[in-house]
Image (spheres, rainbow, N blue to C red):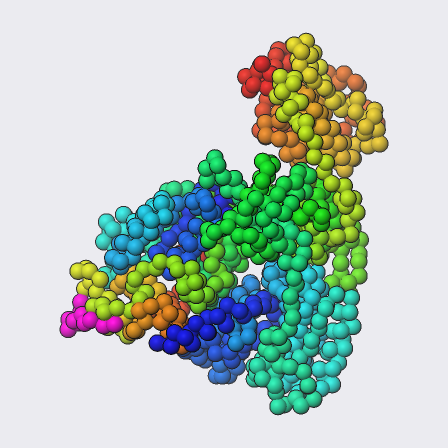
Amino acid sequence: MREVAASFANPVMLYSIGKDSSVMLHLAMKAFYPSKPPFPLMHVDTTWKFREMIAFRDATAARLGLKLIVHVNEDGVRRGINPFDSGSVLHTQVMKTDALKQALDSHGFDAAFGGARRDEEKSRAKERIFSFRTATHAWDPKNQRPELWRVYNTRVNKGESIRVFPLSNWTELDIWQYIMSENIPIVPLYFARQRPMVERDGALIMVDDERMRLNPGEKPKQMMVRFRTLGCYPLTGAIESGADTLEAIVAEMLTARTSERQGRLIDSDEKASMEKKKKEGYF
Amino acid sequence: MGAPADLKAYLAAQEKKTLLRFLTCGSVDDGKSTLIGRLLYDSKLLFEDHLAALEKDSKQHGTTGGDIDFALLVDGLEAEREQGITIDVAYRFFATDRRKFIVADTPGHEQYTRNMATGASNSELAVILVDARKGVLTQTRRHAYIVSLLGIHNVVLAVNKIDLTEFRQEVFDAIVADFSAFAKDLGFHSLVSIPISARFGDNVIAKSANMPWYDGPPLLQHLETVDVDTAVADKPFRMPVQWVNRPNLDFRGYSGTIVGGRIRVGEEIVIPKSGRTSRVARIVTMDGDLDAAQAGQAVTIVLSDEVDVSRGNVLSAVKDRAEVSDQFAAHLLWMAEEEMLPGRQYLLKLGTNLVPAQVTTLKHKVDVNNLHQHAAKTLHLNEIGYVNLSLSQRIAFDAYGENRDMGGFILIDRFTNATIGAGMVDFRLRRATNVHWQALDVNKEARAALKHQAPAVLWFTGLSGSGKSTIANLVERSLHARGRHTYILDGDNVRHGLNRDLGFTDADRVENIRRVAETAKLFVDAGLIVLVSFISPFRSERRMARELMGEREFIEVFVDTPLEVCMQRDPKGLYEKAKTGAIKNFTGIDSPYEPPERAEIVLKTVGSDPTSEAERVLSFLREQGYVA
């Protein structure tokens, strides 16, 4: 992180409000202490995030005294893009991928931190820690810069940028253990609680606000659930769980038989879908 | 929900686990991906949804006839699925009760050697796979050599697909003998050979019943127990400064990751580049100050004196201090399609230093098949050479064998910014040893202040006969008359003394400019305004001169007189001789002149007179505040 701060004119930290982002932000606070991290946080808001995420985001920025940029793809809002009518593919493309490009372009950021980990998904296993993007934000997996030792090539031409993944080598278990040992605040959605849920296509979806469209016959019912990853609430599946403390979450994880992204509806839309999205500029 | 007491014990055990980073390498189809898939599968680290996808994929793409194809688990990218080869490094994570592992799965295809070096650079152990049916191949030797070059001392030779040779011991023994003969000069501390079948799991996790003749450990057991402790904490203290931490005027700390040794509050350190010493006043972290810190920790160090430290400096132990030089010998692995050219300027990044550098000599290249050395003029993609490098400024470093973080570097193309080479500083260099930089109390600023001027170089470039020397002479006369301290370095005059041994070939021209630039730098350090009047035809050398000087200290003056006019003037009769062939390599005739792209001052002499042009230079100096 200090390499980036020292080598780039205009870095930014992409803050997704999830547990990985919380860890990444905590690391940044440590890396620059007693200074504050010399870059702002940016959240690409699809307008469909859980309400608790937004509250947590604003409270975190205020507590740490950091500048927070919130970017919404207004064009997408005008076009009425939403996860119900547009489908998850288009929604993610417009409100996340395109929005991110817009935000990076309009602020002229030349380096962006992200919380992605190599253990999450196959194509992410091959990401570099410093991942080079062309001026159109595309990622070319056959033309990545080799990364030797801890020597990172931070040179970019004008218009090009670099995505930086400080958590590349962390596993999900590492994240939880670190949250526990460092006492890092996380969004309460990770803890099990009674929440209004509907079951749809085998996933448990939370009815977070009145925009949630219910199918005929669907009726929200209170269930004890928690989330392993967070995204847009209509696209994020919960798991039934009684784990309401960090200890309980770690204990549950140790016996888990499914991966955390399983709850993400976007991954299973198409085969190799993550790789496709990344070539288009998804984080 | 687990019982909290068990969980605490479990977490405590987790934290005590050591981490082993290793890489797997071998030829195409030796079964690397299958082996890693097998390790993940058998160590129960696959989630159900991953497994379900794998079973589905195995039926569709698999090469194992309906059985689970473990390779599909690791070969992530679409393109390589179709081609059936791994095209980049993939990192995988797994853990056993004893250790955590990060595996770099590196490519077997010849053209992707650079990725293997990448994987090796961060690994402590290498598993080299050989197909039992094929034995030791060129690829195997290449990979063993790269592994050794990148300083990996622990190697496992995994003889895979032993099931396809009916588990015969003599096949295994022959391969081991073959490999050992090649590897004896590679400096491996431990070399363990294991016969395995990744597909069926023989000797991977558990001992195989098919090979009673093998009495060593299965692969995983060896990986769990092998001692790879490289003990960087016992090496001399080193911390490259990444970032100067100044939240307010009362705090100035230096942030970085310690890459060697340990440090305590109160201990003396030195900045090898300046020779300044100080003591550690505080070791600051967000969790409170520390009394001591060691290799691997990221800290912010506060020193007890106000010494000048910036990014790129290294805080070093005083006794075993880092070496400082602008030249060293190194092994270089070339990673670009475009060939390596001695003399071309690249950017070199070592630790937190980023400096222009060039390969001055390619001493030899190494044939990786037999380790023979051959003379060569250039390096192509995936070739390895032994070179001398010259940097535009001095940096602190150690031999790669002493400290990977202080001796490993990359070369970057100045135009595409691609990483095109990886190098390892060799410790056989003698010149830099024991010549430490002497710290001096009277510095450039002090000398300049005494003279009431800002020292700088006016670098006049242009064709022979363009009017450089005439104008430079007028400028110096005028400055001198006003009490300024100046010195003029003239191309012809310097060639009578300092550079009398140099001719006019491209190589000699480069050296000619290098010496003049160094001399000019000394004069600038003495506080003088230096006028350099040299044809200096090549952009890259002028840039080298510019980069030697400090900010604002280099003023390029392009005396832009067309060739025809110069030929007409021909004050020394040189063009006449050049045209008849009496002089070779004459700039403008049979040697190129590359005009500056962004000179600070451009002078057009046609239709003007030298005095007005000199006046333009003088007013630039006044306007920019070099002289009052």
**Please, is residue A168 above or below residue B538 in the view?**
below
Classified by dominant secondary structure, the portion drawn in magenta counts as loop
Q: Quadrant of the C terminus of chain B?
A: top right
**Please, is residue B190 above or below residue B347 in the view?**
below
Q: Is residue B587 left or right of residue A43?
A: right
Q: Position of residue B367 (x, y in %)?
A: 76, 61
**Residue B188 colored in magenta in the image:** no
Task: Decide which of B372, A112 is in the foreground and name it.
Answer: A112
Q: Residue at x 20, y 68 (%)?
A: A196
Quarter residue B392 falls in = top right
Q: Position of residue B158 (x, y in %)?
A: 65, 76
Task: Decide which of B154, B254 is in the foreground and name it.
Answer: B254
The residues colored magenta run: A214-224
Task: Decide which of A22, B281 is in the foreground and name it.
Answer: B281
Task: Decide which of B189, B284 is in the foreground and name it.
Answer: B284
Farthest residue in the left direction? A217
Q: Is residue B369 left or right of residue B8?
A: right
Q: Residue at x 58, y 84 (%)?
A: B206
Q: Is residue B9 left or right of residue A79?
A: right
**Residue A219 colored in magenta in the image:** yes
Quarter residue B381 falls in = bottom right
Is any part of residue A264 visible from this angle?
no
Q: Position of residue B125 (x, y in %)?
A: 64, 68
Is any part of residue B187 visible from this angle?
yes
Q: How many marks?
A: 0
Q: Residue at x 61, y 86 (%)?
A: B207
